[in-house]
Image (cartoon, helix red, strand yellow):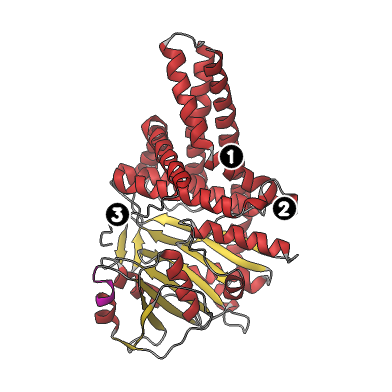
């Protein structure tokens, strides 16, 4: 009996620390956003980028089986507001008509563009220019995975900044101006990430989100709450503390010279976006460089999220495995004060709270069921466990929704916000536990060394 009660106490401490950390990050993020909002209101982006200090940009778009969304996404990117940019689409050996759609829509012809960076990639089958759009290049290669595609894009990119955008995503017209601004203002900035929002059921016209709508799918709504809690306010908080460890592979900008010096994206992990930021932190600190990585919540990238349990489960298993691989490949950071906040706070939190966490959660729930079944648990112990594991998560999610309303107000409809609050409440009763199972499976995949990519079922915008 004592062993099960001990496990429950350990779980209570775990849930308390993780949820309070996220609440603290949300509060830090909210204060940082208030300052950022004032700055945004007084900044004339157009004037800034009419000066000689703007940075030309290469947008890299890895594409694998994206025939349903690829042409609309690229068409939207071509109309972005930015002084000088190019788009490098990398077809990663798609089995569908991705390349055919690109050829027909953009009038592609063979190109004489050559490899500039010489990062190792799968075999290149062809490079194409568009007769209609001089700033569009398509690289066709054998399948090698997302990291391999990004490296191929870096090889053929001409400009000093590179922006990575997923092929099924849409970014707002001024998002590049907003995200490049830190590079113009501060030469120490080596990477900047933008926020990811969920496009499911939003109204899209000519490649732009013209009306934000809450998805009809409850599974997509649950992911909105997750994205607000961890991917938006969580990352804003870590960035404010100079402990940012992740820039989403769906929307981030980097100095190309640093990417090449770091050897590009690692092809040994399925969490290439996190591993890259960890590697940059590690190498730049070891070199004694004064640098910054930043996260801006205002430049928005809209993307589709899974709407089936099977597809979402594969995605979360992959994320958990990628997290483990990225952490192990940069294990020197753990509790190492030479790496600042990343080594002392961020890395330990992700290792113990996110990577090892599902094991603690699982045994905590199992132990709770056992002591309840045999009548060994006191009412105070059960209520404490439920409070820190479920109620505190509901408070955190509610806080994130409230902060979203006080800052960005993407969901202006009162009914939509009511649905989001209901979603935040229901999340703790089933979905949270299911998510724990997926993460446990991802941890098992990591230990077995299996790389499970899976495929998301796209639908037209």
Read off the residue under disc 3.
201
Q: Nearer the viewer, residue 131 or 453?
A: 453
Give the class, few, some or many, for how many residues have Cα within 10 Å of label 3's Cα (few <14, many ≥20): some
Image coordinates of residue 359 in percent, x first then y, are 49, 33
Q: Residue at x 41, y 71 (%)?
A: 61
- The image shows residue 321, relative to residue 138, as above or below, that is above
Image coordinates of residue 257 in percent, x first then y, are 60, 75
The stretch of residues the image draws in magenta is 96-100
Read off the residue under disc 1.
352
Read off the residue under disc 2.
340
Look at the magenta stretch and give its main secondary structure: helix
Please, which residue is most extreme toward the front here? 448
Q: Nearer the viewer, residue 366 or 124?
A: 124
Horizontal side of residue 330 vs 140, given as left or right: right
Rendered-image quadrant of the C terminus: bottom left
Which is more foreground, mark 1 or mark 3? 1
């Amino acid at each position: 009996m004592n062993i099960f009660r001990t496990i429950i106490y350990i779980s209570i401490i775990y849930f308390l620390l993780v949820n309070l950390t996220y609440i603290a990050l949300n509060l830090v993020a909210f204060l940082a956003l208030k300052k950022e909002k004032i700055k945004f209101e007084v900044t004339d982006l157009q004037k800034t980028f009419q000066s000689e200090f703007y940075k030309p940009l290469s947008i890299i778009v890895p594409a694998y089986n994206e025939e349903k969304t690829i042409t609309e996404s690229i068409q939207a990117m071509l109309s972005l507001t930015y002084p000088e940019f190019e788009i490098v689409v990398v077809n990663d050996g798609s089995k569908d008509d991705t390349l055919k759609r690109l050829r027909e829509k953009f009038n592609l012809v063979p190109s004489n563009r050559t490899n500039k960076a010489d990062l190792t990639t799968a075999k290149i089958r062809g490079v194409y220019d568009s007769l209609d759009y001089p700033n569009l290049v398509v690289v066709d290669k054998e399948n090698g995975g997302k990291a391999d595609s990004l490296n191929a894009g870096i090889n053929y990119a001409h400009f000093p900044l590179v922006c990575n955008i997923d092929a099924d995503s849409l970014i707002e017209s001024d998002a590049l101006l907003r995200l490049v601004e830190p590079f113009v203002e501060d030469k120490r900035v080596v990477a900047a990430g933008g926020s990811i929002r969920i496009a499911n059921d939003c109204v899209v016209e000519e490649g732009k989100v013209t009306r934000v709508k809450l998805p009809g799918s409850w599974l997509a709504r649950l992911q909105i709450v997750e994205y607000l809690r961890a991917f938006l306010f969580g990352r804003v908080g870590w960035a404010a503390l100079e402990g940012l460890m992740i820039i989403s592979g769906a929307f981030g900008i980097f100095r190309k010279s640093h990417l090449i010096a770091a050897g590009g994206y690692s092809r040994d992990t399925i969490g290439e976006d996190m591993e890259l930021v960890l590697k940059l932190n590690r190498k730049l600190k070891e070199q004694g460089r004064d640098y910054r990585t930043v996260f801006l919540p205002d430049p928005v990238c809209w993307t589709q999220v899974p709407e089936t349990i099977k597809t979402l489960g594969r995605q979360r298993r992959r994320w958990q495995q990628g997290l483990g691989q990225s952490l192990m490949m940069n294990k020197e950071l753990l509790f190492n004060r030479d790496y600042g906040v990343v080594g002392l706070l961020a890395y330990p939190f992700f290792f113990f709270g996110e990577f090892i966490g599902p094991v603690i959660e699982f045994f905590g729930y199992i132990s709770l069921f056992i002591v309840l079944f045999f009548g060994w648990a006191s009412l105070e112990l059960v209520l404490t466990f439920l409070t820190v594991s479920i109620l505190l998560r509901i408070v955190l999610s509610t806080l994130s929704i409230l902060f979203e309303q006080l800052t960005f107000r993407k969901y202006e409809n009162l009914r939509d916000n009511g649905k989001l609050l209901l979603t935040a409440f229901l999340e703790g009763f089933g979905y949270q536990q299911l998510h724990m199972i997926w993460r446990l499976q991802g941890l098992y995949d990591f230990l077995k060394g299996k790389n499970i990519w899976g495929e998301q079922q796209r639908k037209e915008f």
